[in-house]
Amino acid sequence: MPMPGQGPTKFKGFTLSSFQRKAAAALDTDHNVLVAAPTGAGKTLVAEYAIHLAQKKGTRALYTAPIKALSNQKFRDFTEDPEIDSVGLSTGDITLNSDGRVMVMTTEILRNTLVENASQLSDVGVVVFDEVHFMDDPERGSVWEETLMFLPENVVIVALSATIDNLGQFAAWLERVRKRPLTVVEETKRPVPLKHYLYHPKAGIFPPSRLKPMRSRFKEHQKDREWQRRDDKELVDELVKENHLPILYFCFSRKLCESKALKTSRSRRLLDQDGVDQFEKLWNAGKAEFGFDDRRGPMGSLRGMLARGVGYHHAGMLPLQKEMVERMFATGLLRMLYTTETFALGINMPARAVVFDSLCKFDGIKFDYMRTRDYLQMAGRAGRLGMDEEGLVYSVLDYDDVMDGPINRIQAGRVEPITSRFNLDYASLVHLHGIAGKQYASEVWENSFAAFQAREHSKKREEHNRRQVRALLSKRFQFLEDMGYIKPEREILARGRTCLHLFGYEIQLTEMLYEGVFEDIDAPALCGLIGAVIHEGRRRDTFPRQALRPMKGVLRHAKEVVQQAIERETDCGLAGSLKQLDESMSPAIYEYASGRPFNELARYTSAAPGDFVRVARMTVQYLRHLYKLLEDSDPALAETITEAIAGLYRGPIDVRAELGLEGGAEAVKAEIEKGEAAAPEGTAASKERRNRRDGRRGRPS
C-alpha cells in the first residue's frame, strides 16, 4: 500500500514514475491536476487513473481531445480496457453509447453541451483535457478556454500538456477560474533521450555543435548551385544501412509525402519475406473486416507500396487508407513513413528515428521556421520505450538553413508560452445574454486567461485590453440586436433561440432558415448547400461550373442572405467574421448525395479524397443539428434532412464502418431520434417558412 499522499506505486501492471505518482496522489485528494511532460513520457496513464477513480465513485468521466482521429483511437483503447464499464464516443461525426460511463469526445462537443444542455453533465466527476496546450490554436483555442471556465465547479479537471514556457501562469489562472486546489506536475526528463543531428548533402550528418565551423566552410560556396540544393538520398541510405528503422519522415506538404514515399518504395524493399508474409496476413484481415477492393484504385496502389515497408499519411487520404497505414506502422511493418505533422498530435506511434524534410512550415499566414514546441512535439516521436536507448532526430538543411537558420532556437530554445485566443462566438454571446444580460459577457472576459495575462503584464495593458474588449462586445451585441436575435434586459428572440443550437455557422444557418432558403429544397441540394456553408477550399481547387446548375437558385439566394448579414456586421463597425459560402465542393457533395459512386467524384472536384470525406462528414454533422432543431416544428424539412443524411452517410463517409460497427445511415437516424437533445424552442423559423409556403399554396397558415 502506498504511503498517504504519495500515490500508488503500481497501476494497471505499470510501475509508476515519480511524476505519475505525484499526479495520482493529487487526484486521490480531489485536486485538479495539470501535467506537463514531453511526448511519450506517460501522461495518458494519469488520465486513466483519474477515470479509474471516477468509476469507483460512481461518476462519469469525459475524455476530450483536439482531433477526431485521436478521439477515435482513445475510444478503441478504452473499449478494449476490461476495467472500464462502458465507453461512448461523440465527435460530431458519430455518437455511440451516449450514456457511457466514460465518454470520449472532441472539446467542441463538450463546449456545445455546456451551452445547449448543461444538465446532461450533472453526473460527470472528472474531465480529461488531452493536449490542453491546443488552447493556443488561433482558430479553435477559445473552445478550450471557454470549456475550462464554464464546467461546473464540482468537476475535477485533469489537463495534459506538452512542455510550455508559462506553465506557472497557466496554472495560476486555472486554479483561480476552477476554484479548486490545483497540483502542477512537471516532468522534463524524457524516458528515452533524444540525440539531434543536422544533414546537408555537402556536409553529411553532423551534430548541432558543429554548425558554427560548418557555416565558415559553406561561406566559400555562396554562389555554387550544387551547394544550394536540398537532397536527402545519402541520409536515407545511411539510416537504412545502419538499420535505424522505423523512421517517421515529416514533410509539410501532402504531395511531397506521396512523391517521396513513391520514390522510396520503387527503389527499396524494406521488408524481408517474413515481414511480407506478416503484411499479407494483416492486410487481408483488414480487407475482410472492411470489405474494401484492392484490385484497383486507392487501396490497390497503397497495398503495393506498403508491401515494401514504405507508406505515407496525411489528412487528404481516405480514412480507410489512414487506418491501414496506422495498423501497419503500429505493428512495425512500416519501416519508413512519410507524414505531415498531424501524425504527431497525440497518436501514440513512436519510431526509432525522426527526420524533418525542412525546419520551415506554413503557420497559416506564411512559411517560416517552426516553433520550438512544434519541433519537440514531432521530434518526441523518436525513441521507443523499452526498445531504444535513445531516439534519433535528423533535420535536412539547405544552404540558407545552414547559414541563417535559427537551429539552436528550434532545437534547444525555450518552448513558446500558451497565449489566450479567447473570442466568444455569437451563440455564446446570446447564451450569456440570456443568463445575466450583456454585462455578463464582460464579466466572463474578466475571468478569461486573456484578461489574466493582460493583468499580469501591466495595469496599463490590462486597462487597454479591457477597453478594447468592451468596445468589441458592444458592437457585437449591437449586431445581434439589429439582426433580431436579442433585446435588452436578457431577452432572447426566436432567431437567437435558434442559433443556440447551430454551432460554428450559427448566423449563416439561422438567417437561411428564417429567410426561406430551405423552402422546397431537395435532399441533394440541401447537402450541397450545407457543404458550401462549411467548406473553405484551397485556391487551386477546381470544379465544373455547369455542375452547379441543379442548385444554382438556392445557392444564389443563400449567398444574398449571408451577404446581408456580412454587411450588417460591417455597419456595426465589426471586421467581417462571417464566412461567405464556398461552393467549390458543392458539385461533388450534390452528386454523391444523389447516389453517384465515390470513385466518380474526381470529375466534380480536384480536392483530395480525404478532404471530400471531411467536408461530407461535417455536412452530416450539421444536418444532425438541423434535424434536432426541426423534427417537431417542421416534419417535412426534417424528413428531407433524413433523406439527405441517408444519401451522404455511405461508403467512406460512414464513420461506423470505419470503427468496425454496422448500421450506417439508419443508425445515425436512430442516434438523432434517441432524444439526446429535446427539440429546442427556437423553431419560429420553420413556422415562418410554413406560413409562407402554405400561403403560396393557397392553404390557411
Image (tube, helix red, strand yellow):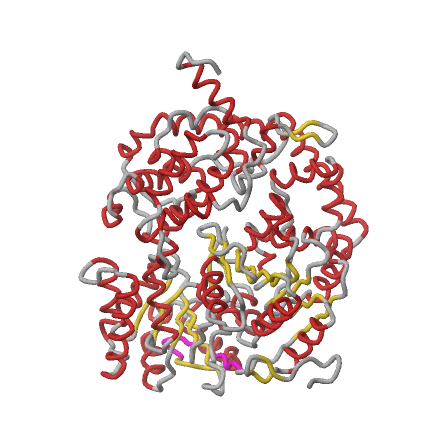
| Residue 119, placed above or below residue 209 | above
Q: Does any portion of residue 612 appear in the rendered image?
A: yes
Bounds of the magenta segment:
193-203
Q: Is residue 359 left or right of residue 122?
A: left
Residue at (63% x, 51% y) in the render: 421
User: Magenta stretch: dominant SS?
Assistant: strand
**In the foreground, 53 or 284:** 53
- The reply to whether the magenta stretch includes residue 187 is no
Give the quarter of the figure containing the N terminus: bottom right
Residue 376: x %, y % from top left = 53, 71
Q: Is residue 501 left or right of residue 236?
A: right
| Residue 519, placed above or below residue 340 | above
**In the foreground, 674 or 600:** 674
- The reply to whether the magenta stretch includes residue 194 is yes
Residue 151: x %, y % from top left = 67, 53
| Residue 361, placed above or below residue 205 | above
Task: Tell me where residue 291 sits by quadrant.
Answer: bottom left
Give the farthest residue toward the top: 698
**In the foreground, 500 or 198:** 500
Residue 524: x %, y % from top left = 33, 36
Task: Tell me where residue 399 sits by quadrant.
Answer: bottom left
Residue 515: x %, y % from top left = 49, 24
Q: Is residue 234 left or right of residue 581?
A: left
Residue at (43% x, 19% y) in the render: 693
